[in-house]
Image (cartoon, coloured by chain):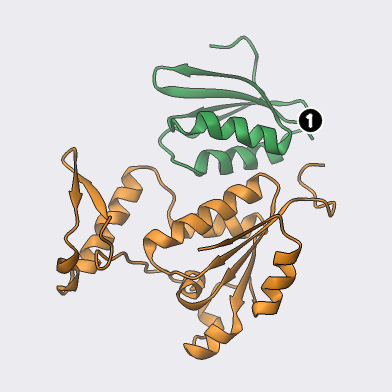
Chain colours: A green, B orange
Amino acid sequence: MSDIKPDEVLDTKGLNCPLPILKAKKALKGMENGKILELASTDPGAIKDFEAFCKATGNKLLKSWEDGGVYMFLIERVV
Amino acid sequence: MADMDLGNAKKMTIICTKGTLDWAYPPFILATTAAAMDVDVTMFFTFYGLGLLDKKLNLGVTTLGNASMRMPMGGMQMAMPNMIGMLPGVTAGTSVMMKNLIKKKGVASIEELREAAVLSDVRMIACQMTIDLFEKKTENMIDEIELGGAATWMESALQSDINLYM
């Protein structure tokens, strides 16, 4: 769990690469600077992929954790 | 702004030469992911890859000449005997099997990925020479394509950070 309150929540459970990234990008695009996206994924590859995605796009990966087979990510939109 | 092209975005081109269900994935996955990571992507479709631009896709995969093809079956990895691919209906059957697997595993369809590519402004160039060679009709292809040749790709490739051939 996390004590940071997200502004948007995105469920990509059951979806495989590259759909979680594509959906995250779409969601972040519509968000203002500093807003926070919480994303859930069941794709084990998402852990590395979201680190790489955030590094390349400049968005900030605030936190990631596992919750019973679900990988959770908190991403801050950086414009 | 991260999303806007300020002229200093990273660029990538992919030459797509194959039109089977399995080979359609690598270029579309990389193109859409790169676009999501703010890379300007150009895809150049030539020879059998051109079929990936058809409005209506009916992609198939064959066991023929595909010695490393394994399909999961009852918790095992089953080798697909090369030779059965010659029998009528086997390619269609293998293709249906693969598409079911794709759906079951939450993998995007090629139609979905192509739509995502279009929405994220991936540039898609259809090879004019191949269109002439195979007498393809552009009206049967998606609207978002532009026509071009080797020089069009070169111009884009020369400015790109990554150029892939698939």
In front of the other: B66 or A4: B66
Query: Would you call the spot at circle 1 few (<14 residues within 10 Å), some (14-19), or many (20 or more)?
Result: few
Q: Residue at x 57, y 67 (%)?
A: B15
Residue A30 makes an appearance in the image: no
Vertical relation: B86 (above or below) B70: below
Across and down, in percent, residue A3 comes to 62, 9
Vertical relation: A14 (above or below) B130: above
Q: Looking at this view, name the residue that lies furthest to the right.
A: B6
| Side of A32 where B32 appears, left or right | left
Pointer 1 residue: A33
Residue B57 makes an appearance in the image: yes
| Side of B6 where B56 appears, left or right | left
**Quadrant that contains the C terminus of chain A:** top right
Q: Residue at x 24, y 51 (%)?
A: B70
Identify the amino acid type marked 1: Asn
Across and down, in percent, residue B62 comes to 27, 66
Vertical relation: B112 (above or below) A28: below
Helix, strand or loop for disc 1:
loop
Q: Residue at x 53, y 84 (%)?
A: B130
Q: Looking at this view, name the residue that lies furthest to the top.
A: A3
In front of the other: A79 or B153: B153
Vertical relation: A75 (above or below) B54: above
